[in-house]
Image (spheres, rainbow, N blue to C red):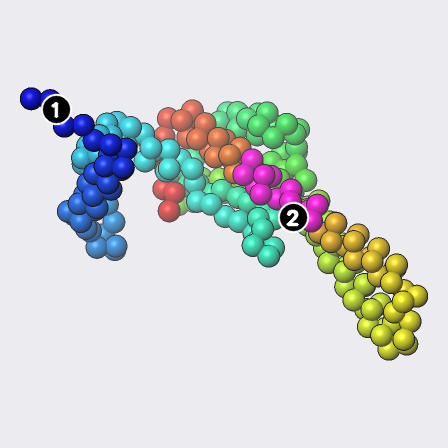
């Protein structure tokens, strides 16, 4: 007897119905309880994911640290990561961290000690090591200062153009000032656009760099998954 063969449309329908059935049958946990790693690994087995890969993915998420961001009109003007290491870093580990920061961000920066606090800074880019009851907390943060200046300047130019327009409407000299208005508006919008367009790629790159620094620090220190909140 020839084995039944399914067309492309039938294959799509079969997997769609199977996914719906899996979703319907899946055990639900109260949001407040959350899910343990064992719960995640059990679900992974059901869909063919090895438990060790689920555990590796969970650890990678822990090592990423708590994200932080600053936005202007929904655009990421500043990014950051914070991680509780769960123990104190030694002087040697801090020095290796500074080396990693310099290599990752291609910047020499400067180191400062203020009592129990340590920091490495390069312009708007900062790495702050702070004491906690359980050890040390590392904060990485930065702001795209050039984009903020371009966007602010663009808004100012558009504002000036609007003020000039109001003035010319009052005096009835709109035609005479049309070229000035057009120039100011074009410069303002261009400046704002140049700053805004650079932000998504810059923020993505900085997040990746920060996550890499944090993961290498945690792995080199031999610590368990930190409290990432």
Region in magenta:
193-206
Q: Which residue is mark 2?
A: 196
Residue under the point 18% across and 27% down: 5
Q: Residues within 10 Å of mark 1 (few under 14, many from 20)?
A: few
Viewer-nearest residue: 97 or 3: 3
Residue under the point 65% across and 48% down: 196
Q: Residues within 10 Å of mark 2 (few under 14, many from 20)?
A: some
Viewer-nearest residue: 10 or 220: 10
Q: Main secondary structure of the magenta part?
A: helix
* The quarter of the displayed image where residue 199 is located: top right
Q: Residue furthest front?
A: 1
Q: Position of residue 114 (x, y in %)?
A: 59, 42
The number of numbered badges drawn on the structure is 2
Task: Look at the numbered disc 1 and give the secondary structure of its residue.
Answer: loop
What whole-number distance in Å separates the C-alpha atoms at marks 1 and 2? Answer: 58 Å
Task: Look at the numbered disc 2 and give the secondary structure of its residue.
Answer: helix
| Numbered badge on residue 43 | none
Q: Position of residue 64 (x, y in %)?
A: 42, 37
Q: Which residue is mark 1?
A: 3
Q: Position of residue 66 (x, y in %)?
A: 44, 44
Name above or below for residue 90 compared with residue 186: above
On the rendered structure, is 176 left or right of 205?
right
Mark 1 and mark 2 lie on one chain; the one further toward the N terminus is 1
On the rendered structure, is 102 left or right of 193?
left
Residue under the point 23% across and 27% down: 50
Q: Position of residue 191 (x, y in %)?
A: 74, 49
């Amino acid at each position: 007897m020839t084995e039944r063969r399914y067309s492309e449309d039938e294959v799509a329908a079969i997997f769609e119905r199977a996914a719906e059935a899996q979703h319907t049958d899946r055990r639900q946990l109260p949001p407040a309880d959350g899910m343990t790693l064992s719960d995640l690994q059990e679900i992974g087995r059901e869909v063919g994911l090895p438990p060790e890969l689920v555990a590796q993915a969970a650890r990678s998420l822990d090592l990423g640290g708590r994200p932080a961001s600053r936005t202007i009109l929904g655009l990421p003007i500043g990014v950051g990561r914070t991680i509780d290491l769960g123990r104190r870093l030694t002087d040697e580990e801090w020095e290796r961290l500074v080396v990693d920061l310099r290599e990752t961000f291609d910047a020499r920066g400067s180191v400062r000690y203020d009592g129990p606090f340590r920091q490495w800074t390069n312009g708007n880019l900062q790495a702050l090591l702070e004491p906690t009851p359980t050890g040390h907390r590392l904060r990485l943060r930065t702001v795209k200062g050039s984009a903020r200046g371009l966007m602010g300047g663009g808004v100012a130019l558009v504002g000036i153009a609007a003020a000039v327009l109001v003035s010319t409407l009052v005096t009835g000299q709109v035609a005479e000032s049309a070229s000035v208005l057009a120039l100011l508006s074009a410069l303002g919008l261009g400046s704002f656009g140049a700053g805004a367009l650079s932000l998504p790629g810059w923020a993505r790159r900085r997040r990746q760099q920060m996550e890499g620094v944090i993961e290498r620090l945690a792995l080199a220190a031999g610590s368990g998954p930190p409290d990432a909140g």
